[in-house]
Image (tube, rainbow, N blue to C red):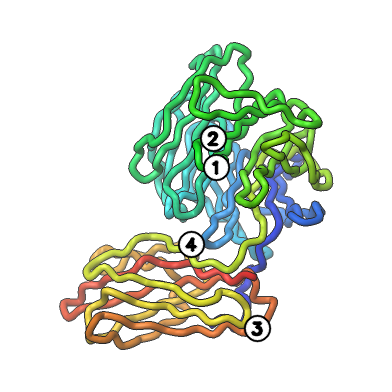
Amino acid sequence: MLAALAPGQQATGPHLVLARMPGNPSSRLYDVNAGNGAVAARPRFLGDDFMPLAIAIDPFDRHALIAVDLGNGQSRILRLPPWPGAAPWILADVNGRIVQLRVAWDWLAVAVDDPAGGLLRLPRRGGTPTLVHAQANVTAMSGHGPNSHDVLLAWSGRATFGADSGLAIVDVDTAQVSYGPFAWTNPSGVEITAIADLPLPQARQLLALGDGTLQQFTGGPTPVALATTPPLPAGGCLALESVNGPALTAVAIGGASLPSIYEVDLLSGAISGHSRAIPGEPVDFAFGQPEPGRAIPYSRPCGAPALDLSVSGALQPGGTIVLGLDHAAGPGLALLVAGFDDFAGALPVALPGGCGLQVLPQATLLLPTDPLGHSQHTIAIPLRTELLGAILFAQWLQIDASASIALSAAWSLQVGL
């Protein structure tokens, strides 16, 4: 199945920037090379005449998730596939101003700045938004990876409504607060524009403020300033991502006063590695550093028995992977469903009994299960560099004698280095 890239699939690499432009279009997308800082414009998209608010990349299929301002106190979330000429899908309209988007497992977390706002969620492929955690004046949010339900929220104290700034970690799935909430007064009225958890054994968060200052928070009572060299201008940090690696760094983007992506050394405060200037006024970016081949699950098993899909092997050109099945009924038969899309404008599709097919069924294989309920299928990946970035989606399905359908969780299988 992996003989060639599906349309629009490409190797990971560039950061994806959402910028505000004068005139029409009001929104523009730019790729920023993570290595040399080069900037390249992406084609226009339907809906780019609205003002931009926020952007994220769906880690399972690499679609762009874009929030735009509809006016009259409403925001819209668009899903834009990566292939040329693709039209975006409208996922949802939301009351209030969206400030950040994050995928948390199979949820899309939405941070809304509004007196009646807070943290909302909807299925990442579209659905009705619901309020998870009420909090006025939310101005920043960050996530903890594709298979985490947790997001880190920050809000800014304002004289007009809610005088305290603060932060908390909230579970998007259960609405439980696992860290905080912490709060401190904000007499200056300077807003938090970005936040990130730092990859340290002890809890520590990095906050960016609208006046260009950075702060670290270690549990209270108030954040502590992190001096940067050189100092950042006002509006110099609108979004940031901490980086897991040997050096303790964060990647950030500035607005009109510093329209580039750059790195912050979190020990010394040194600012370095500026990209080339990004046209217009950047408002947000989606981190896009190259990644190795990986297999990441989404959705949950459904029905009985609870089927378990496992993945082993090397997800790289020239490698071989094995898709295993456990806990099925056996001896018998099971169906392996695979395809190059997990969205297709209609997925998931409810099957008889209520379980959801999560994968576009472009290939199906009927395979035997042994008496212990095991099965497997091996896929050899051709040694071709153009397969870097290819994504295959897979899910097991089994139907018993009573026509009851059970499905495994689905997996996104991403070919990398």
- 212 relative to 56, above or below: above
Question: Does label 3 or label 2 sit earlier along the sequence?
Answer: 2
Residue tagged by mark 3?
383
For the residues bearing labels 4 and 1, Cβ distance under 8 angstroms: no
Q: Comparing marks 3 and 1, which lies closer to the viewer?
A: 1
Q: Position of residue 227 (x, y in %)?
A: 72, 27
- 108 relative to 358, above or below: above
Q: Nearer the viewer, residue 121 or 252?
A: 252
- Dot 3: what SS? loop
Residue tagged by mark 4?
345
**Taking 62 as reference, is 274 left or right?**
right
Question: Does label 4 or label 2 sit earlier along the sequence?
Answer: 2
**Taking 257 as reference, is 348 left or right?**
left
Q: Comparing marks 4 and 1, which lies closer to the viewer?
A: 1
**CA–CA distance in space, label 4 to label 2:** 39 Å
Q: Amino acid at mark 4?
A: Gly
**Taking 253 as reference, is 106 left or right?**
left
For the residues bearing labels 1 and 2, Cβ distance under 8 angstroms: yes
Q: Which mark is residue 204?
A: 2
Q: Comparing marks 3 and 4, which lies closer to the viewer?
A: 3
Query: Residue at the location (42% across, 78% down)?
Result: 323
Q: Is residue 319 visible?
A: yes
Q: Amino acid at mark 3?
A: Leu
Q: Which mark is residue 200?
A: 1
Which quadrant holds the C terminus? bottom right
